[in-house]
Image: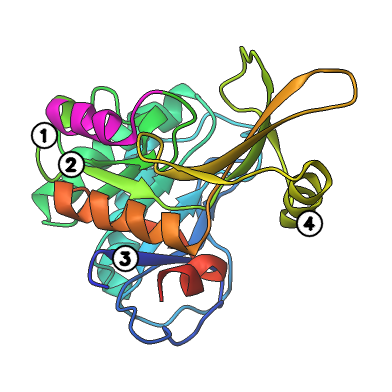
Amino acid sequence: MENIVLVTTGTDSARLPEPFQRRLCFSHCLSPAASLRRRIATLEPDSSILGVSDVVPLESGGDPERLCSDLLAEVEALGCPGVFLDLERGYPVLREFVKLADERLHAEGVPLYVPERCGEGLRHAVVVCEGAVSGGSFDRRFADLLEGYGEGRVAAVLQPVCTGFELPSQDADGAALTLGELEALRARHGAQVYFSKELCAKYFTFMDEHSQGHFVLFDDRSTVQEKYRRLTAMGVGPCFVLARDASLLL
């Protein structure tokens, strides 16, 4: 499981379950004043990738140079083997911070991981992409990403999906379903489940009482493992997996 990174927050999963060897811990966030802040008062040096999120709106401009210096100091103090910047908001100070971190972490030999939405214009960061598609081709999508960013610069989030779509659908995201809702729909309509090689997921279709067509796309243990196998074979990695989903890979 060398290509898997388990994702935790705070003090979750103090010890990694076997056979997993790597972890991303969202131990840091940005304050409203755009300064780096630890989520918990005391952090011990360990081998976790350091995760930073912006969980609150910024109330003041902040200094990207100071942010970057503080980040590098934390990486050194904690002995982190990498950094994941999961920054949702498009503030100019954060864009500049990510660009500075891209260059300075690379100079220190520390990998930087960013979501796909933050990857544009960065020269070194590993771009982390959603490991699910609702149309087109799973393999083609990641082949295109590798061609665009280059070998060693594409990673993936492996999170099982369970989504319903009306047919025809103009919405690529659909509506999220719980596992209970999924099973209830399948049982109510007696739907046959199929595997889509192109989407690397399972699906079924049905007509409701109003003659409206529906398409339900979902993952289970077999499809999550198949995605992991394909991504690893293509050279995509690491694959980030929420700790709660780790059992799907065993």
Which of the marked residues, 2 or 4, is nearer the chain's N terminus? 2
Circle on res. 150:
1
| Left or right side of 234 for 250 | right
Image vertical order of residue 97 relative to residue 8, above or below: above
Q: CA distance from mark 1 to mark 3?
A: 20 Å
| Left or right side of 15 for 188 | right
Circle on res. 180:
4
Asked if residue 8 can be seen in this view, the reply is no
Disc 3 marks a residue whose amino acid type is Ile
Determine which residue is flagged by label 3.
Answer: 4
Looking at the rendering, in which quadrant would you find the C terminus? bottom left
Region of the chain picked out in magenta, as a range: 136-147
Residue 145: x and y in percent read: 23, 30
Which of the marked residues, 3 or 4, is nearer the chain's N terminus? 3
Please tell me whether residue 140 belongs to the stretch shown in magenta: yes
Q: Cβ–Cβ below 8 Å for labels 2 and 1?
A: yes
Q: CA distance from mark 1 to mark 4?
A: 40 Å
Circle on res. 203:
none
Q: Secondary structure at mark 1?
A: loop
